[in-house]
Image (cartoon, rainbow, N blue to C red):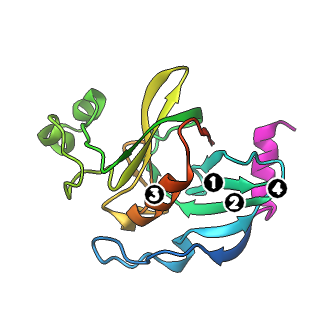
Amino acid sequence: MNRRQMMLSALAAGGLGTASAVQGQTLSQSNYRIPRHLMPRQIEVDESFVPGTIYAYNEQRMLYWITEPGRAIRYAIAIGAEGREFRGTAHVARKAEWPSWRPTATMVRLEPAVYGPYRSGLPGGHPRNPLGARALYLYRGGRDTLYRIHGTPQPWTLGRSFSSGCLRLANEHIEDLYDRVPVGTPVVVV
């Protein structure tokens, strides 16, 4: 059994158990109440998960920050629409608070009505800026993957396949993760 199969087996077999919720607000900037099951939680994980690593599971729509052997914080995420989701390994090469955003040329080409009006970008903090409060920039082999782990002004998308490919957390949840994760953090997305 390879490492990926082992990790998925551990998750499927209940290797992750629910414990206490992480302290934090339950309301986003839009006053949408995030359902309790989508709130961050301290959980137990298989001890083979590497502390200081982010693991994200597209099918589960969950992200895990491994805090110590056998312990993690689980965050609900929205993932990319089918065919756009990120998979593989990367590392956090850069972090930004209230980052500016510009859609990629591919986003504008594929959905000109949606992204065309924003081709010049949006400043950080703009209510339509999809990066929200914080962003972790994912690089592979020294190159920007153009994928991010970031906040969202649309917390009702958590647990769904919704975005253009990035992993999205509620703004207050990405603020918590952002404060915990240093530049250089390995990221594994399956």
Name the residue: 66% across, 45% down.
53
Q: Of callouts 1 and 3, which one flags the residue occurring earlier in the amino acid sequence? A: 1
Which numbered circle lies on residue 46? 4
**183 or 127, which lies in front?**
183
- SS type, badge 2: strand
Q: Of callouts 2 and 4, which one flags the residue occurring earlier in the amino acid sequence? A: 4
**84 or 137, which lies in front?**
137
Give above or below for 173 relative to 22. above
**Residue type, mark 1 in image:** Trp
- Separation of residues labelled 2 and 4 (CA atoms): 10 Å
- Separation of residues labelled 2 and 3 (CA atoms): 15 Å
Which residue matches tag 3? 174
Q: Of callouts 4 and 1, which one flags the residue occurring earlier in the amino acid sequence? A: 4
* Callout 2 crowding tier (Cα within 10 Å): few <14, some 14–19, many ≥20: many
| Left or right position of 22 against 50 | left
Which residue matches tag 1? 65
Name the residue: 83% across, 48% down.
48
**Residue type, mark 3 in image:** Ile
* Callout 1 crowding tier (Cα within 10 Å): few <14, some 14–19, many ≥20: many
Residue 15 within the segment the image draws in magenta:
yes
- Separation of residues labelled 3 and 4 (CA atoms): 24 Å
Residue 173 % position (x, y): 47, 63
Q: Of callouts 3 and 4, which one flags the residue occurring earlier in the amino acid sequence? A: 4
Please say if the residues under marks 2 and 1 sit with CB atoms less than 8 Å apart.
yes
Residue 38 % position (x, y): 53, 70
**30 or 172, which lies in front?**
172
- SS type, badge 3: helix
Which residue matches tag 2? 72
| Span shown in magenta | 1-16
